[in-house]
Image: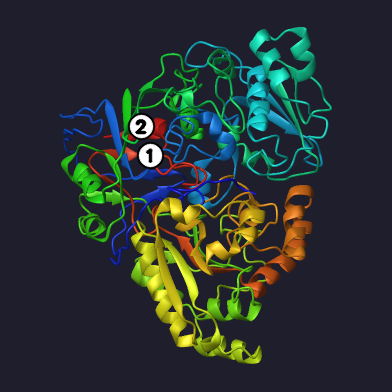
Amino acid sequence: MQVPRFESWRDKRRGISRTVSVVVVVVIIVLVVGGFVIATSQKSTSTSTSSTSASSTSSGSAAPSTLTMDDTTYPINGVNVLTFVDEVPWPDWFEISVYQPLVTANSTAEYQTGEVQFLPVLATGWTSTNDNSTYTFTLRQGVTFSNGDKFNAYQYWGELYGDYFLSGNSSGWWQSYSIFNMTNVNFGPSTIALMTQSGLINPTPQLLSIMSNSSWPIYVTGPNTIVFQLKAPFLSFLGTMVSYVGMTYDTQYVLNNGGFGTAAAVNTNFDTTPIPGTGPYTITGVDPNNYLTFAQSSSYWGANLTAQQVKGNPAIDPGHVKTAVVNFVPDDLARYTALSSGSAQLVAVDSTANWDLVTANPTVYSYTVLPAWSAEVSALSLNVNLYPTNITAVRQAIVRGINYTEINQDVFSGQMTPGMGPEYPLYSQYYDLGNLGPYQYNVTAAQDILKAANIDPSTLPTLVFRTVATCNFCESIAQIVESNLAQVGFTVSITSLSDAEYSAAYGNYANNVQNAAALGQISILGGETWAPGALTAADNWVSFVSNNSSWGNWAGYSNPSVQACINSFLTSSSASSTVSTCTTAQKAVYDDAPYAWLGYAKLWFYSGSLAWKSSEVKSFTLDPDWGGIDTMPLINTVVLE
């Protein structure tokens, strides 16, 4: 049910080119405290020069006025937030710091205790009906976008139906969650023309009558109130508002500057020209495939928030540096060099050699370690629509013929927690229902399954394992799987492709079924790895195993009992009923084996992590979607020493 949340087309929303780390981390000097990553050490100075990226210089005892972070992937679609409906730009470096949602998650509780709580940002509060089918939000008053335009319910209404229009009027436009009945909605060019003529800040009576039409699923009841009427109860609705379509931008500015475009041709002027947001920072510089620069907004509504208010809700923090730079630096050595020289305060480190240097110097460097309930999963998809992986016994043998411990130790430095998908451990109520446990490596059991099905693996065609050539750790996984499955009797051929080649054949469930022959028998889910795009217990179910999946069901898998579980998530107000239905579904997924679940990550980049000098960075907050939206810290929460 998710749309492309890929990282460099690898991993649904968390990928990036990562290399294998074989270092066993023996010293962990970072505390992940609910999204705040705390590190302390003595102070050092930082300087920088660079001809290919933006940079900052700081010295002395005062905290630097500029924050510099180096990442591995420049945002897909640049800064064009009209593509939020497609769950890009990714990585969303401007998440929350520029474009704020009505509601966000309490990262402190989420990362520290595994508890999911929701906090107001642009909403001051909300109510829901007893069956959780209708949600009413009261919006914060006195908020303006950075250009001075007023934020109100009319602006947000226009944004959301603009998203619907840009989706091609898809029923699953809300981050692929088909939770609204759009039957009575008649929104298109004529309505957009009326919006343009009227304006959204003070709409005409004609436009206001459309906005307040309660037969549409989203409608306003005044300038500061907006109602979401779902077609069925959905307990996790608030979790869908934390990211992408939940983020707000200045729709009036869009209308004044060329409009939305169309589903086939979104207005690309905004790829490099940022639409104003309401957050504590504005985007001040865009250098495509190089860097973005940010400055604190002089008009931020939360500029005078108290320390206590910010402590309770870090997402609304007005920020701690005047300017910030996020660089796209594809070379890992260059990123590590920037870190060691002081030209960047926070960087992504993911190569073996450089990760060794970070972990070998615990008095100098700190890095992010994720808790045991991490939502970041790595898995292999087994194509259920291509011979011979369309045979259940073959898939059952494959998942038992893989040495997960070897992959964990040799590829992920022992920093993966074994598990059973599709649910992730954060939602313990729905995780591994039936206590089936992860698949176990057992060559004899794999061979016995094939014998019982009268299958001689030596007579089967070669299994094609597709990988991304720039993903070194993917290549290492493939080589281990090739060796492991040879012991069972399978022959595996590894095919390394460019990002474009790898991703070209993948799409929604129907496309993956239709394109089965082009997808090979085995691939790494999402190209590399996967983190949720919406903070809901349903997210991985609707992505990996739904016949309505817009992106993520790379196995092309569907099962009636599994679909019943997904439907229960989206239509039931009873958690116990969903647990019962999904227990049956979990057994079906386990037995059908469309995926070999490698585990859940402890490191931010699986084989590496965010790193910084303990003397330079005091604290920051991570993406509430576990890196599914942003692979850097939230800019407004970073506190430098």
Describe the element under mark 1 as helix, strand or loop. Answer: loop
The dot on residue 74 is 1
The residue closer to the viewer here, 363 or 164, is: 164
Q: Residues within 10 Å of mark 1 (few under 14, many from 20)?
A: many
Q: Are marks 2 and 1 in contact (CB under 8 Å)?
A: yes
Quarter occupied by residue 75: top left
The residue closer to the viewer here, 309 or 8, is: 8
- At a point 45% along the width and 87% down the height, the residue shown is 487
Q: Amino acid at mark 1?
A: Tyr
- At a point 34% along the width and 45% down the height, the residue shown is 72
Image position of 377 (left or right of 205): left
Image position of 545 (left or right of 35): right
Task: Using the rendered image of the protein, determine whether residue 529 is visible from the camera's viewpoint.
Answer: no
Figure check: 365 above or below 133? below
- At a point 34% along the width and 71% down the height, the residue shown is 410
Q: Earlier in the sequence, mark 2 or mark 1?
A: 1
Q: Residues within 10 Å of mark 2 (few under 14, many from 20)?
A: some
- Quadrant of the image containing the C terminus: top left
Figure check: 246 above or below 26? above
The dot on residue 288 is 2
Total numbered labels: 2
Describe the element under mark 2 as helix, strand or loop. Answer: loop
Quarter occupied by residue 446: bottom right
